[in-house]
Amino acid sequence: MGKGLNQKSCLVLQKDCKDPMADTKEGNKTSITGFILLGFGNLHELQIFLFLLFVVICIVTVAGNILFIALVVADQHLHIPMYFFLGNLSCLETCYSSTILPRLLASLLTEDRTISVSDCLIQFDIFGSL
């Protein structure tokens, strides 16, 4: 054995060393019930300000995108491929904002930093299906 290596470290370096947890029949029975959101956790004094800021940003974004879609649909001169593409992007942005921001706003308002696994999967499925 070389200097600084004891018997335990030599056993770890061997290729045929077995994992002691691999022989257990029961395995890990831990179930995950939720996740902790860490975003703005340390900014307690700014939570109301951040809530109001994100509400204003959300309202302006959704209203602007809906206004753009209504304008493209109403004006016959804007029925060209470029505005059709921009209208689709506006619709997608409205849907993405409606998927993510409500949970962020609820987290800022209630100081509840957890999200259940089922809620997370539903949000991920909606976000991914867009």
Image (tube, grey):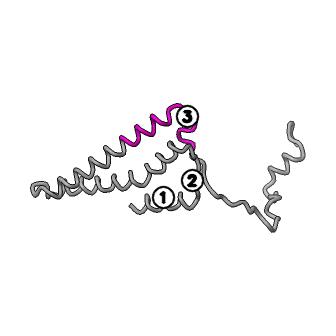
Q: Which residue is mark 3?
A: 44
Q: Where is the N terminus found, in terms of image quarters? A: top right
> Where does the magenta region start and end?
38-56
Mark 2: few/some/many CA within 10 Å (<14, 14-19, 20+): some
Q: Is residue 99 left or right of residue 70?
A: right
Q: Position of residue 13 (x, y in %)?
A: 80, 50
Question: What amino acid is found at the position of numbered circle 1 in the picture?
Answer: Gln
* SS type, badge 2: strand
**Residue plotted at (80% across, 60% down):** 21
Q: Which residue is mark 2?
A: 115
* SS type, badge 3: helix
Label disc, if present, on residue 123 of the rendered structure: 1
- How far apart are labels 2 and 3 at the CA level? 19 Å
Q: Are marks 1 and 2 in contact (CB under 8 Å)?
A: yes
Question: What amino acid is found at the position of numbered circle 2 in the picture?
Answer: Ile
- How far apart are labels 3 and 1 at the CA level? 26 Å
